[in-house]
Image (spheres, rainbow, N blue to C red):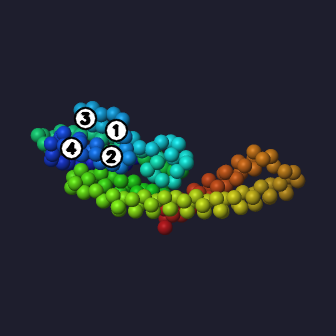
Amino acid sequence: MQKLIGFNIKRNKKLLVSDIIKFYEVRGYELIDADVRGMTFKRGSIWGNMTSLNPTKWRTTVNIEIIKKERLDYNIYANYKFTTSGFFRTRVEDHYYNEELNAFSKAIENFQLDTEFIETILDKTNKSNFQLLTNSLLLGVPTAILIILAINSFTNSTLPTLIASAITAIAIVVVYVIFVQLRGKA
């Protein structure tokens, strides 16, 4: 998923760059590239996407572009590339990402950073993802068992373990997708 935020600020460029770097380092990002036009930050990893329900562990890349309009007047553009926990993003994850963008804007424009509010949203996102995963397992596994039993009874033989495992995985993913879609409409 990709999100873009842009705003104008009147400030000394050295202080601006310093504030941007401080903001992202406090949020757990690492500066991986910088040049005259901007900088790139990275947080998390692909492994974090697969093993964690916490969005701060998921791979996120931020490209910052600083464009000079006139003396002490700059346009700032932040292009976020978020990787979500699954194939679809939930409304709670989307809210977290929007607040991450808003936090950057407020921190740079107004020197405000409400870390407690962001942490509250992060906790809510973690709990929502855990609940979604738990519900998917609780409904997906019995659904898969019913499908496997039905196939076994129609074929008068037992499915190989690999095929039964694939059916179970597919059932869990389908239930996950259904829950994400239902949460998006709620």
Which element carries disc 4, helix, strand or loop? helix
Which numbered mark, 2 or 3, is in the foreground of this view?
Answer: 2
Residue at 66 percent of width and 51 percent of height: 170
Q: Which residue is mark 2?
A: 24
Number of other residues with Cα within 10 Å of mark 2, as a class: few under 14, some 14 to 19, many 20 or more? some
User: Hey, what amino acid is under mark 2?
Assistant: Tyr
Give the mark, 1 or 2, whose residue is nearer the N terminus: 2
State the mark number for residue 102: none
- The residue indicated by pointer 4 is 16
Residue at x 50%, y 62% (from the top left corner): 127
**For residue 31, which numbered disc appears in the image?**
1
Is 167 on the left or on the right of 12, as rendered? right
Q: CA distance from mark 2 to mark 3?
A: 17 Å
* Disc 2/disc 4 C-alpha distance (Å): 13 Å
Q: Which residue is mark 3?
A: 37
Query: Is residue 166 among the parts visible in the rendering?
Result: yes
- The image quarter in which residue 138 lies: bottom right
Q: Secondary structure at mark 3?
A: loop
